[in-house]
């Protein structure tokens, strides 16, 4: 723990929002005492981990990398984090990310752009960029990110590690700051399938504080080692034939497909919605939900307030000055699609498309066990470049957002390339995703 804290102190890649030195040393002392008393310790006991700065951990900063919450301290602890604490894991750092999860590069932050672990001139990816880079650099053993439309999978791909978005509802969202509540997922990032499995098991389960959670079975190691029941995989033809895909990513993906075929697996081409439909559906719904969720942040109950002549003006000035440009763009967009005269035309259409996307997945999974896709159509941009063109940044989420809308379990498997392979299964089939990741090894 001390060694990792020392490494993080230098903050070489802008991954650190705050160090949890006191909490960490206190937890570590408990584990030391257990060892000294000759007690057996659990798998996660004493393991240092990082937390994206959108989770509550009582008494510590929870800034969402935003100006508005930069001095806010958590009043309670998130269920997922509490479960890790109960298992003896040791939180050491709150990690830099795009503010409120808004972004794909971890540049929308007051703490400075996160640098990519492989090439520091490139972005770390986002929004859970700090979490991915910390794992990749061995500053943490695992980190807990949040994935609404790709924020665990994409930075995992950019930094060549594993990152899982579990089935929606498998892990409680209580204590995760809400971005788009209908797709927000708690997700672990780590360097091995085994670590992902252990951390997923520790965090999963029904929680009375999040009514979308359900009871799931523990995923046993022996179950994911036997891969003989995987017979058929599919991929979306239009993702690979799209003009937007980088040539190298396409070649790497097709090479992976050939390897899988050579191992005796049947591969099917599948039809799917075009990328621009997926991206516009996702952003319509995500912006609507975030506009609603962030309406509570007016400087009264949470964060800093700028006082003005009356309450209404104080709200307006606080929100105008303390939300980032990207966050304001989404709040304005979200309120627009929800407003009278627009909601039927835009928001309700978004909901209908989401149903159609889910139906498409259901049909696909009658034919195949697993759907494969590249994580992103493009490689990580240079720091500074994606800020110039928000629309291009939204489009770079083309391959991750559909699976989020479908609430499916989906994992980035590193390929030693600039972005990984995305492995997706039917709802509640997180075990199969991990199994396939083992099959790929
Ligand atoms: N890049 C996507 C967005 O900005 C996904 C972010 C996320 O999953 N938090 O909405």
Image (spheres, grey):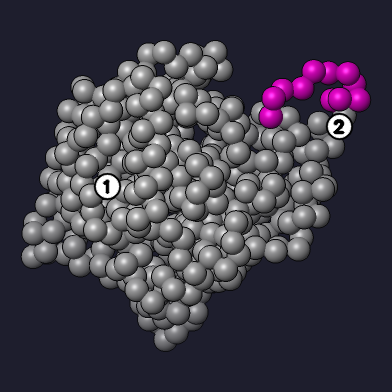
Give the main secondary structure of the magenta stretch: loop
Q: Is mark 1 on a helix, strand or loop?
A: helix
Choose between 439 and 385: the one closer to the eye.
439
**Residue at the image point whose x is 39% and y is 39% from the top:** 255
Mark 2 close to ligand 1, CB under 8 Å: no
Q: In the image, which disc is placed on residue 272?
A: none
Up-down relation of residue 392 to residue 430 (above or below): below
Q: Per the image, is 298 magenta? A: no
Question: What span is colored magenta in the figure?
Answer: 34-44
Q: Please give the residue where the numbered disc 2 appears in the rendered image.
A: 32
Up-down relation of residue 235 to residue 435 (above or below): below
Q: Can residue 210 be seen in this view?
A: no
Q: Percent x, y for residue 150?
A: 40, 49
Up-down relation of residue 311 to residue 363 (above or below): below
Up-down relation of residue 184 to residue 305 (above or below): above
Q: What element carries label 2?
A: helix
Nearer-N-terminus badge (2/1): 2
On-image quarter of the N terminus: top right
Choose between 206 and 98: the one closer to the eye.
98
Q: Please give the residue where the numbered disc 1 appears in the rendered image.
A: 240
- With 196 as the anchor, is 210 left or right in this view? left
Choose between 144 and 390: the one closer to the eye.
390
| Quarter occupied by residue 427 | top left
Q: Percent x, y for residue 8?
A: 73, 56
């Amino acid at each position: 723990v001390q060694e990792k804290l020392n490494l993080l102190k230098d903050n070489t890649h802008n991954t650190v929002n705050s160090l949890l030195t006191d909490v960490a040393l206190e937890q570590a002392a408990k584990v030391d005492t257990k060892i000294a008393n000759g007690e057996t310790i659990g798998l996660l006991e004493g393991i240092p981990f990082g937390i994206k700065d959108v989770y509550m951990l009582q008494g510590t900063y929870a800034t969402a990398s935003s100006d508005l919450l930069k001095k806010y301290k958590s009043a309670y602890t998130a269920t997922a984090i509490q479960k890790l604490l109960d298992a003896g894991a040791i939180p050491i750092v709150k990690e830099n990310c795009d503010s409120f999860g808004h972004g794909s590069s971890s540049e929308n932050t007051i703490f400075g752009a996160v640098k990519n672990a492989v090439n520091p001139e490139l972005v770390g990816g986002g929004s859970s960029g700090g979490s991915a880079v910390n794992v990749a650099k061995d500053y943490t053993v695992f980190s807990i990110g949040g994935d609404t439309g790709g924020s665990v999978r994409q930075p995992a791909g950019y930094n060549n590690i594993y990152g899982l978005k579990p089935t929606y509802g498998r892990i409680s969202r209580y204590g995760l700051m809400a971005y788009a509540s209908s797709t927000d997922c708690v997700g672990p990032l780590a360097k091995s399938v085994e670590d992902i499995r252990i951390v997923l098991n520790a965090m999963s389960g029904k929680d009375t504080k999040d009514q979308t959670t359900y009871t799931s079975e523990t995923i046993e190691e022996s179950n994911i080692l036997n891969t003989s029941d995987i017979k058929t995989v599919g991929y979306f033809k239009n993702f690979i034939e799209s003009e937007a895909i980088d040539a190298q990513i396409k070649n790497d993906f097709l090479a992976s497909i050939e390897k899988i075929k050579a191992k005796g697996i049947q591969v099917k081409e599948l039809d799917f919605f075009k990328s621009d439909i997926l991206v516009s559906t996702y952003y319509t719904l995500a912006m609507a939900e975030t506009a609603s969720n962030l309406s509570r942040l007016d400087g009264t109950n949470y964060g800093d307030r700028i006082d003005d002549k009356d309450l209404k003006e104080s709200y307006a000035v606080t929100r105008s000055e303390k939300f980032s440009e990207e966050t304001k763009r989404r709040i304005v967009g979200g309120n627009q699609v929800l407003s009278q005269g627009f909601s039927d035309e835009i928001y309700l259409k978004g909901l209908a498309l989401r149903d159609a996307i889910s139906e498409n997945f259901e049909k696909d999974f009658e034919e195949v066990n697993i759907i494969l896709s590249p994580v992103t159509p493009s490689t990580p941009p240079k720091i500074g470049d994606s800020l110039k063109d928000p629309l291009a940044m939204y489009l770079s989420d083309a391959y991750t957002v559909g699976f989020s809308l479908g609430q499916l379990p989906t994992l980035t498997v590193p390929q030693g390339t600039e972005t990984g392979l995305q492995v997706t299964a039917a709802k509640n089939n997180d075990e199969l995703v991990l199994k396939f990741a083992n099959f790929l090894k």
